Image (cartoon, coloured by chain):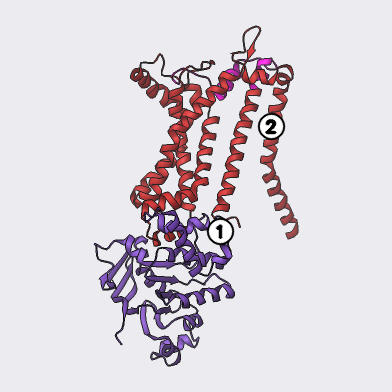
Chain colours: A red, B purple
């Protein structure tokens, strides 16, 4: 009887553990399956570097460069916001904050991370966009700049809390060794702690970027939605995720447009996969560097 | 002969939060001698040694009473510069803790943070310290390899060399061989015996034989109190206190 139960538990947990693998395979296969008609009938190179996205025209244009550029620009903009604020917050929390400041700041950051993205989008649309429009005198506040700003703020808690984790993983013995040699706190931080946490901090940044690349709701609401290669950061843009969300409902199942949207999804999937792989490689190197992997 | 005192502790109490962990310790550490602190775990020997270079400053809720004089100057005086104190009083820790940098950078660190820029000087100093720490022959061809590639014993000798680079007057060893194998331990002990010609050495150890082998003076501590202090030979042969005798004969500890 006992052996039967042990075997049963073993199987139940094995199946549960492999369920996520099943989902992953299912998603990838669907993406490939649905994008196949498009990929078979269109040149991939022309699609990725095509300048015009007019999927509903006749004949239709499926140039994805405007969408890819938009994702790229908005992500880059978000990095400019979230890296300094996120890493700065982590350094402050780790090095300077008193116990009471930490007690307030850490939960606050976690709450910020937990806010649904639609709230960020809403906030960007109602408050930030009109403000930017008035302040800079641009035609519309719904543009790449505003989207970058909101995305950056949204990715900041991810970067901050992961970077703070990386800093706190640096063994106390490194700090002690540095201080015992007569280094002050600033030298210890910049020359020992931050370099030791370096790849952990990079991982934090990369995962923050991953969050920005895949984010849909904010860019759908705030980026302006124009599928054109922007001349400046104050032009409206339509990133890949926003394109999928906006157009999926209006397209005919099985059409070239339908399949093209899955192709965008497939490209997006590979971009985020690449980001995650890079993050994994870096964090593995980080463990080795701290001597935790031996 | 006058007692040549390097460090003297006068009625030192140490509080961790509201608990008193060191009770009125008074002790004189002599120049260019090896002084060993022994006692069972939790007796306060590590706490005491960490007071001598103010490493306990980092512990939240720590408080020190009494005086610790280094060459007659109170190291807990508000005007004492902790940075220069720690350059005079170096420390080697229980677990080897080289930085995740190259061997060379580990050794150069103490100099560059002090503002030394002269490359030739740094290099000479590094080679000098490696030789003193009996590590030079093993690493001379791979100074730019990561220090974490070295064995535990080599890492600990690297930490000793790193400490020597800044030319301290006192070296504190906090159970330096606790994580090492017997052969590496022996090398560390031999090194300590060589270094005592130039440096004042304080060593914490829970290995009584080690204390007997390397030290000139031994202090036995128990539950935050200094029970007995004196010549190592005398302590180990004719201890005055019953508790010391019981500890040394292995009745507790």
Neighbour tally class for label 1: few under 14, some 14-19, many 20 plus, Cα within 10 Å: many
Placement of B239 over or under A126, stated as above or below: below
Any part of residue A1 in sight: no
The secondary structure type at the circle numbered 1 is: helix
Q: Could you tell me which chain the residue with mark 2 belongs to?
A: A
**Location of residue B232 (image quadrant):** bottom left
Closer to viewer: mark 1 or mark 2: 1
The residue closer to the viewer here, A98 or A233, is A233
Residue A114 as seen in the image, left or right of residue A104? right
Total marks placed: 2
Tell me the quadrant of the picture where the C terminus of chain A can be found.
bottom right
How far from the left and from the top, in percent, is residue B216? 42, 83
Q: Position of residue B39 (x, y in %)?
A: 44, 79
Asked if residue A153 lies in the magenta stretch, the reply is: no
Give whichever of B252, A138 is nearer the camera: A138
For label 2, the residue is: A28
Does the rendering let one see residue A285?
yes
- Quarter of the image where one finds residue A265: top right
- Mark 1 and mark 2: span between their CA atoms? 41 Å
Residue B79 x %, y %: 24, 62
Q: Which residue is mark 1?
A: B148
Query: At numbered mark 2, what does the secondary structure look like: helix, strand or loop?
Result: helix
Q: Quadrant of residue B49?
A: bottom left
Q: Magenta residues?
A: A233-261
Give the position of the N terminus of chain A as an image quadrant.
Answer: bottom right
Q: Which mark is residue A88?
A: none
**Is B251 drawn above or below residue A224 in the view shown?**
below
């Amino acid at each position: 009887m006992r052996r039967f139960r042990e075997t049963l538990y073993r199987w139940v947990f094995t199946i549960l553990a492999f369920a996520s693998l099943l989902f992953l395979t299912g998603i990838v296969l669907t993406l490939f399956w649905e994008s196949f008609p498009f990929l078979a009938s269109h040149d991939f190179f022309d699609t990725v570097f095509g300048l015009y996205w007019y999927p509903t025209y006749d004949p239709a244009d499926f140039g994805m460069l405007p969408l890819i550029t938009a994702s790229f620009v908005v992500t880059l903009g978000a990095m400019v916001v979230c890296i300094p604020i996120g890493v700065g917050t982590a350094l402050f929390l780790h090095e300077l904050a008193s116990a009471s400041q930490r007690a307030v700041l850490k939960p606050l950051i976690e709450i910020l991370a937990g806010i649904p993205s639609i709230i960020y989008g809403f906030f960007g649309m109602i408050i930030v966009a009109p403000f930017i429009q008035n302040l800079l005198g641009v035609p519309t506040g719904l543009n790449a700049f505003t989207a970058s700003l909101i995305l950056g703020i949204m990715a900041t808690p991810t970067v901050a809390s992961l970077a703070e984790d990386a800093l706190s993983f640096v063994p106390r013995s490194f700090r002690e060794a540095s201080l015992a040699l007569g280094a002050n706190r600033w030298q210890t931080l910049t020359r020992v702690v931050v370099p030791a946490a370096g790849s952990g901090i990079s991982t934090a940044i990369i995962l923050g970027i991953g969050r920005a690349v895949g984010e849909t709701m904010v860019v759908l609401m705030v980026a302006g939605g124009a599928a054109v290669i922007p001349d400046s950061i104050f032009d409206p843009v339509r990133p890949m995720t926003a394109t999928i969300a906006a157009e999926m409902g209006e397209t005919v199942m099985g059409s070239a447009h339908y399949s093209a949207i899955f192709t965008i999804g497939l490209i997006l999937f590979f971009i985020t996969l690449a980001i995650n792989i890079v993050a994994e490689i870096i964090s593995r190197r980080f463990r080795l560097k701290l001597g935790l992997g031996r | 002969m006058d007692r040549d005192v390097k460090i003297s502790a006068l009625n030192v109490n140490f509080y961790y939060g509201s608990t008193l962990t060191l009770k009125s310790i008074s002790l004189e550490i002599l120049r260019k001698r090896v002084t060993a602190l022994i006692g069972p775990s939790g007796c306060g020997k590590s706490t005491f040694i960490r007071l001598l270079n103010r490493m306990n400053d980092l512990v939240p809720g720590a408080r020190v009473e009494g005086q610790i004089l280094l060459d007659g100057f109170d190291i807990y005086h508000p005007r004492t510069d902790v940075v220069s104190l720690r350059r005079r009083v170096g420390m080697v820790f229980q677990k080897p803790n080289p930085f995740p940098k190259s061997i060379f950078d580990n050794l150069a660190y103490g100099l560059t943070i002090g503002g030394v820029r002269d490359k030739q000087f740094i290099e000479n100093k590094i080679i000098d310290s490696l030789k003193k720490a009996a590590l030079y022959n093993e690493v001379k061809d791979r100074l730019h390899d990561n220090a974490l590639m070295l064995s535990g014993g080599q890492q600990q000798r690297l930490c000793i060399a790193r400490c020597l680079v800044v030319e301290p007057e006192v070296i504190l060893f906090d159970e330096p061989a606790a994580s090492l194998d017997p052969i590496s331990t022996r090398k560390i002990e031999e090194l300590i015996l060589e270094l005592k010609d130039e440096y004042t050495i304080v060593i914490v150890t829970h290995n009584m034989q080690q204390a007997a082998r390397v030290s000139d003076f031994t202090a036995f501590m128990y539950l935050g109190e200094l029970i007995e202090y004196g010549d190592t030979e005398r302590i180990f042969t004719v201890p005055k206190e019953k508790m010391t005798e019981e500890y040394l004969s292995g009745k507790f500890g």
